[in-house]
């Protein structure tokens, strides 16, 4: 059967994917080491929040295979995939579930980190929005959810390796180049997700990162004036 090279992943989706990978690794490293790097851990969390906001909107206004409407699977698609009868471009049904799980877990991890504290010197940029008890509770969940995220990332990597070696399907290359060789009947290139859609999604991402950094909170009160030294 003849094959054709078609566009699958648009540039914004690819930039999102690899930037998110870098930021998650940075957040993991800085959080694990701690100390003075905890401030950079917080900055990575703010950037991840902005990226997730971008991906949420891009799932509605991006190109074909980046849209949730295209890859969020229903029971019929899942059953067809499990029987080896699913065909299509973009994420397969199980891969789509993996992506959705990663996005949801990352969203909780970023959100809980924004209001967390370490009882020493670090408070998340939105710490003031919750009580100390709520912050302590979410900080605990933030630490526990880290291991859920690790498990999902490992499963994601193992699935990529399985497809590469068992099915001879390189899932990484199209996420770098944006294109894939597919049989002619399946050759439906991605459409949509143009410059205007990208500009809107980028603006929302920047606004979300600014809000996550505490941009909407009132400024802290000025410190009390220093007492005058005794004149003797």
Image (cartoon, rainbow, N blue to C red):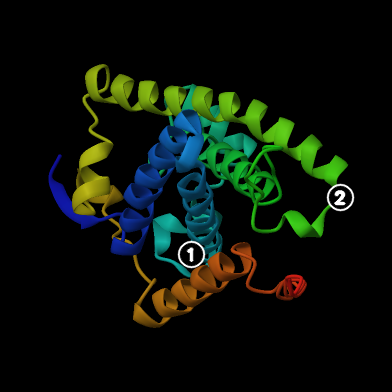
Instruction: Please tell me which residue lies in front, 227 or 105.
Output: 227
The quarter of the picture where residue 21 lies is top left
Can you name the residue that lies furthest to the left here? 2
Residue 188 vertical placement versus 2 (above, below): below
Please give the count of numbered marks on the rendered protein: 2
Closest to the camera, between mark 1 and mark 2, is 2
Which residue was labeled with disc 1? 58
Can you name the residue that lies furthest to the top here? 166
Residue 55 vertical placement versus 228 (above, below): above
Which residue was labeled with disc 2? 131
Residue drawn at the location 79% of the way across and 37% of the way down = 136
Residue drawn at the location 54% of the way across and 65% of the way down = 209
Instruction: Please tell me which residue lies in front, 87 or 221.
Output: 221
Residue drawn at the location 15% of the way across and 39% of the way down = 1
Can you name the residue that lies furthest to the bottom here? 196
> Residue 159: percent from the left, percent from the top?
38, 24
Residue 81 vertical placement versus 42 (above, below): above
């Amino acid at each position: 059967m003849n094959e054709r090279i078609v566009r699958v992943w648009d540039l914004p989706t690819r930039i999102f994917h690899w930037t998110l990978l870098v930021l998650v690794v940075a957040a993991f490293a800085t959080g694990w080491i701690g100390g003075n790097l905890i401030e950079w851990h917080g900055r990575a969390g703010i950037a991840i929040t902005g990226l997730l906001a971008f991906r949420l909107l891009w799932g509605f206004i991006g190109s074909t295979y980046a849209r949730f409407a295209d890859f969020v699977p229903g029971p019929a698609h899942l059953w067809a995939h499990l029987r080896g009868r699913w065909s299509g471009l973009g994420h397969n049904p199980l891969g789509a579930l993996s992506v959705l799980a990663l996005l949801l877990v990352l969203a909780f991890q970023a959100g809980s980190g924004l209001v967390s504290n370490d009882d020493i010197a670090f408070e998340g940029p939105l710490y003031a929005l919750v009580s100390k008890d709520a912050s302590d509770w979410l900080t605990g969940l933030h630490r526990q959810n880290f291991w859920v995220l690790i498990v999902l990332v490992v499963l994601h990597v193992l699935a990529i390796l399985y497809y590469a070696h068992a099915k001879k399907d390189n899932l990484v290359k199209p996420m770098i180049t944006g294109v894939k060789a597919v049989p002619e009947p399946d050759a439906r290139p991605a459409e949509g997700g143009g410059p205007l859609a990208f500009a809107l999604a980028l603006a929302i991402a920047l606004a979300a990162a600014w809000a996550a950094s505490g941009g909407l909170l009132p400024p802290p009160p000025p410190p009390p004036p220093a007492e005058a030294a005794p004149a003797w």
